[in-house]
Image (cartoon, rainbow, N blue to C red):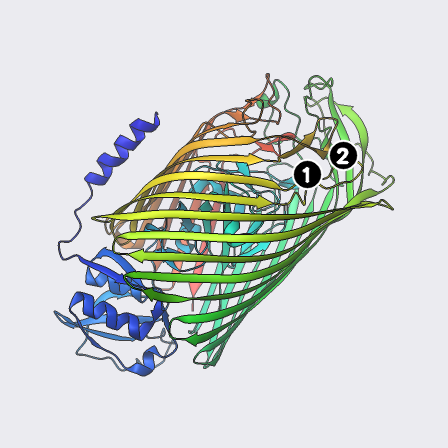
Amino acid sequence: MRPTTLLVALALCLTALPARPDNLVKFDVPPQPAAQALEALASQAGLQLLFAPGDLAGLQSPGVSGALTPQEALTRLLAGTGLTFAFTAERTVAVTRAAAPQKTGAAPAPQRAELEEVGVTAAREPPYAPRSASAATRLDAPVVETPATVQVIDATLLRDRAVVSPNALADLVSGVQPVVGYGTTRSQYFLIRGFSNLGVSYRNGFKVAEVYTPRDLANVERVEFVKGPASVLYGAAQPGGAVNTVTKQALDQDLAQAVASVGSYSTARLTLDLNKHLGAFSVRLNAAGDLGDSFIDLESSRNLLVAPAARWQVTPGVTLTYDGEYQRTTRKGWSNGLLPVPGLQDLPVGTTVSEPWTTLENTNVSNHLELVVALSPGWSLRQGLYDARSWRSHKSVSPAFSADPVADGNSLTAHGRVAYTQAKDDPTNTVSQTEVRGALQTGPLTHGLLAGFEAGRSVFEFNGAYESLDVVDLTTFQPGATPPYVDGPLGGSRRTATALALYAQDLVSWRDLRLVAGLRHDWVTSSSVALPGGDRTTQDEQATTARLGALYLVGAGASVYYSFSQSFSPNTFAQAAGGGVFEAERGAQHEVGVKYAPWDGLEATASAFDIRKRNVAIPDPADPLFSVPSGEQRSRGLEVSLAGQLGRHLRLIANAAWLKTEDEYGARIFGVPDFSANAWGVVTLPLGLEAGLGLVHVGAREAAQPALDYFRLPAYTRADASLAWSGGPYRIALNVDNLNDARIINSLEGFAVLFDAPRRYTLTGEARF
């Protein structure tokens, strides 16, 4: 389907949606304390407010702007405050604290009989289309008023799709493909708008320097995909986009939830979510454990996650929060795929060159501490500290990685293997952020201001051995005959990046116009030491990055925008043969787009972009374990998305992307299709039933970098389905992934290829107490 055809179809669909209500009011209330924000909204809408000042003490409102009904405006204005509202008369609104859930057997709380509930609480986000996302601006700005493409995968969508592996998030956004890491670990490794997020992701707004680190989603509240460069706010960032994971925090209510599941390949999983509110203190614990086999016979794995969180309201204006994670992952018989050679796509999906004695052991530990102090009405100070460490070792058998496997003599019947062991493969990351934010009025302009200082240090150290093993016939090979590999001489490197940065951003509102301008300056010192006993190479770099965006609310829930942004990312994970440091990668993007929100809880976006990236490090053709400098890469494309609630009984997310990528020689970038699309919808049925159906289509793409003229990853279309029943505090769901048993092959970093799993089932039971 051509881009113009899809845009016309999307426009026709949007015009067929129900019209917006006619009681719209133009609101323009900046972020500020909740009491002042409510007074401003009441003045603009002609409402009378009833509230107890003590209920609003210390609460901050994200503000609201745009043409909305008073109900929609109040919902957005009170988002995240724990307040709810009810109309007691046509123009009178009572604002109160949302009631905490009743404990079993407890006497019901007294009700205010004179209040007529409107059926919506301010803290509750609509499914599939959260109103705000912090990753794009570090402020809780409405997505529809942010001049950038932002897609949020919320808790409802994660539950409906029964997502366990972060890689599966690629099936729920536009222009994103998973990159399968070594040993098929559950990492957050993606190609976004054609570019890898290698070594850089974000957790609660803090950079995490990791590549293959396994991640569990049991303690995840939502995942935010911000498309395009984001270096102004995050420093080291890839130009395709930033992926920010928001974890579950301690709540001001009691909560207990247990979820158990069983599935194909003898998999079993149990998660717990427990929260206790103790006056000024709240504590929360998320835990998960799972085990199981794989569609590759020799593989099995175990995983454990323990994630505590706490919140202390020190005074009405001072809040201290903590969250941590401990995750332990072990795998036996892990696989690194196969060489892309002719005929490989016809092999059984469980084919491997690995051995039963291969192993992976990985431990992650992270701690996040944050202090927020209210300085004055509308202003606050935030001090955050984040530390993440991983300890990983593995023994593996892999295909003999090659830039051109056939030219090196490989085929189905003569497939080279290498033994690869790493005694140490450890990333470490520590970040401190000091930030001031607030609202300011200058004449007719309202400013959402943000300024900060960031200091960070990341280290990546590995020590291992790599050597040729033998050649096997894939058509007859059976694992188990080769004795365990004995480690040869160990070698490796220690690569360190220390960074300091100052940044500032202004989010300006004036009538129907929104402007965002940001600037950041980074000082980065990178060093590399070849192990054992090599010389140290050090490189100092500075970079100034900028962003500029403008959005205009054209009315009836629609807006148009333009944005320009830049990226800067040290090559921490690229290793030169014999040691050395590569010059930092730099990128820039231009983007134009249209957003449409016909009602609260449904949003559509269409955007076109052009990204250029310089100083790219690519695999060394002589030895893929090392890198060599390259030139420029470019990505141009068009993305469309629709997400939210279509009527009372259908929630839907649908995405499509057309991409044209090329390197300095005009060749496509590996793993990126020209066209991809996905859709998932859940319909509510009688008797507490819900049925879900989804499709994922990915076009043909290059298997390697540089591209191979004899092998491309074939296109595929995959169907997924679900059936769920809910009754009171209980829920039972059956999810079927790859319902049509599509044959799927993905790329492993442009070196090798891996089959994806065939049809698989997951049966889940959930209970709340």
Q: Is residue 393 left or right of residue 351?
A: right
Residue sitting at x 51%, y 65%: 435
Residue sitting at x 24%, y 69%: 40
Please, what secondary structure does the residue beneath circle 1 have? loop
x then y, percent, for residue 124: 34, 62
Q: Mark 2 Cα within 10 Å, few/some/many (few <14, many 20+)? A: few
Is 67 above or below relative to 278?
A: above
- Mark count: 2
Q: CA distance from mark 1 to mark 2?
A: 9 Å
Please, what secondary structure does the residue beneath circle 2 have? loop
- Which amino acid type is shown beneath numbered disc 2? Gly
Do the residues bearing badges 1 and 2 touch, measured as CB atoms within 8 Å? yes
Position of the N terminus, as image quadrant, is top left
Give the residue pinned by disc 1: 298
Residue sitting at x 43%, y 80%: 316
x then y, percent, for residue 693: 36, 40
Give the residue pinned by disc 2: 480
Q: Which circle's residue, 1 or 2, is located before the other in the chain?
A: 1
Residue lying furthest front:
443
Is 625 above or below relative to 505?
A: above
x then y, percent, for residue 270: 54, 58
Is 698 above or below relative to 648?
A: above
